[in-house]
């Protein structure tokens, strides 16, 4: 740099320091007045969360401690009817089955969604927008109709079950207690398949968003360092896509654990989930305190599982 340029720079810096209204003062003032901006932006979300989640949850907890019946009326007597929660243990099989089915459907969704999201993000080219529309297209149809369609797909005399019987796949699945003899409908497998299909888009979209913003030059650099495609996927692509994996598994597992439509339409009472029990307690038995206790325990259990899962598998972007 020439001597004249150095002198001009020194004069500019001296003028900025000598004028309080200069850029430095304005910048520091802007920082001082904008420190509350993030909190103001989060206020609507916090209010929504408090009004439609925290308050209803506390009301659910309070109602689970009530005594009485629908005919005689309900009342609360301090410290509350905590014996209601003893009935939760009677439905431990439904709780376990719900988390098992939700976990299996989440794993199936991840296995199906990751290659699909990878293809859309890196290989689809000009068809990217079209494929994304096709992913969310099922949402334009009612959840109930989509689930009922699986009754036709998994019919005993349908092509899917006929092929599975011909290939003896149903015999193998029967050993795993996922099907019964040569039937698929009204079995645990049918419920898991319904959950997988209905919640698959919730896995694809976060994975796509995470993969799409990844710099492909990182994979090229790994291959330039003599990395195989599988090693590049395992060492580079997979770690960078973990935020999408964590988000997708949460968006799939949480609603699947509380779902009751798939078990109601594709299963039987032998494979009922905790959502079916809660529905019956609310609308058939009309035992509102027990239904509230089951709902609160389910919600609390999911929150605990999500907390430890995010702490264990989350990334810096999610913690």
Image (cartoon, rainbow, N blue to C red):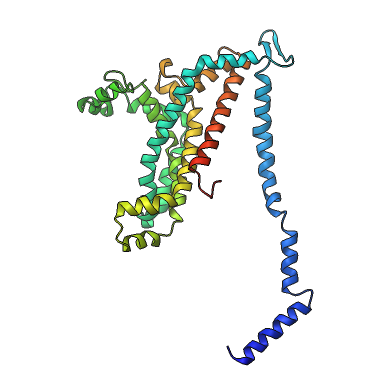
Residue 284 locus on image (x, y percent): 55, 13
Residue beneath the point at 69% across and 84% down:
10
Query: 283 above or below 306?
Result: above
Residue situated in front as seen by the camera: 218 or 158: 218
Query: 90 above or below 58?
Result: above
Query: 213 above or below 69?
Result: below
Residue 174 in the figure: left or right of residue 110? left
Residue situated in front as seen by the camera: 280 or 302: 302
Q: Residue 44's image quarter? A: top right
Q: Residue 155's image quarter? A: top left
Residue 160 locus on image (x, y percent): 27, 29
Quadrant in which the N terminus appears = bottom right
Residue beneath the point at 48% across and 42% down:
313
Q: Residue 125's image quarter? A: bottom left
Residue beneath the point at 69% across and 40% down:
47
Residue beneath the point at 75% across and 59% down:
33
Residue situated in front as seen by the camera: 227 or 298: 227
Question: Extreme left residue here?
Answer: 166
Residue 209 locus on image (x, y percent): 47, 50
Query: 214 above or below 263?
Result: below
Residue 188 in the figure: left or right of residue 173? right
Residue 276 locus on image (x, y percent): 50, 20
Residue 34 in the figure: left or right of residue 181? right
């Amino acid at each position: 740099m020439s001597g004249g340029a150095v002198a001009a720079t020194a004069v500019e810096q001296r003028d900025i320091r000598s004028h309080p209204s200069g850029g430095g003062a304005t910048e520091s003032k802007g920082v001082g007045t904008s420190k509350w901006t993030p909190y103001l932006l989060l206020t609507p979300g916090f209010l929504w969360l408090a009004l439609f989640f925290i308050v209803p949850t506390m009301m659910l907890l309070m109602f689970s401690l009530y005594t009485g019946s629908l005919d005689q009326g309900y009342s609360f007597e301090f410290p509350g009817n905590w014996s209601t929660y003893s009935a939760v243990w009677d439905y431990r099989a439904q709780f376990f089955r719900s988390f098992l089915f939700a976990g299996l459907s989440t794993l199936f969704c991840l296995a199906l969604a990751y290659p699909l999201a990878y293809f859309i993000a890196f290989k689809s080219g000009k068809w990217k927008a079209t494929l994304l529309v096709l992913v969310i297209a099922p949402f334009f149809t009612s959840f109930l109709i989509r689930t009922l369609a699986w009754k036709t797909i998994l019919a005993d005399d349908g092509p899917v079950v006929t092929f599975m019987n011909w290939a003896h796949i149903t015999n193998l699945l029967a050993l795993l207690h996922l099907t019964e003899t040569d039937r698929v409908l009204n079995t645990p497998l049918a419920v898991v398949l319904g959950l997988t299909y209905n919640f698959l888009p919730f896995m694809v979209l976060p994975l796509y968003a995470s993969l799409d913003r990844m710099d492909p030059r990182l994979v090229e650099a790994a291959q330039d360092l003599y990395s195989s495609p599988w090693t590049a996927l395992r060492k580079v692509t997979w770690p960078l896509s973990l935020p999408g994996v964590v988000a997708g598994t949460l968006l799939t597992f949480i609603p699947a654990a509380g779902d009751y439509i798939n078990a109601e339409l594709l299963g039987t009472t032998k494979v009922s989930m905790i959502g079916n029990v809660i529905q019956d307690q609310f609308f058939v038995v009309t035992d509102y305190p027990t239904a509230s206790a089951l709902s609160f325990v389910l919600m609390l259990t999911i929150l605990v599982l999500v907390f430890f899962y995010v702490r264990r598998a989350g990334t810096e972007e999610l913690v």
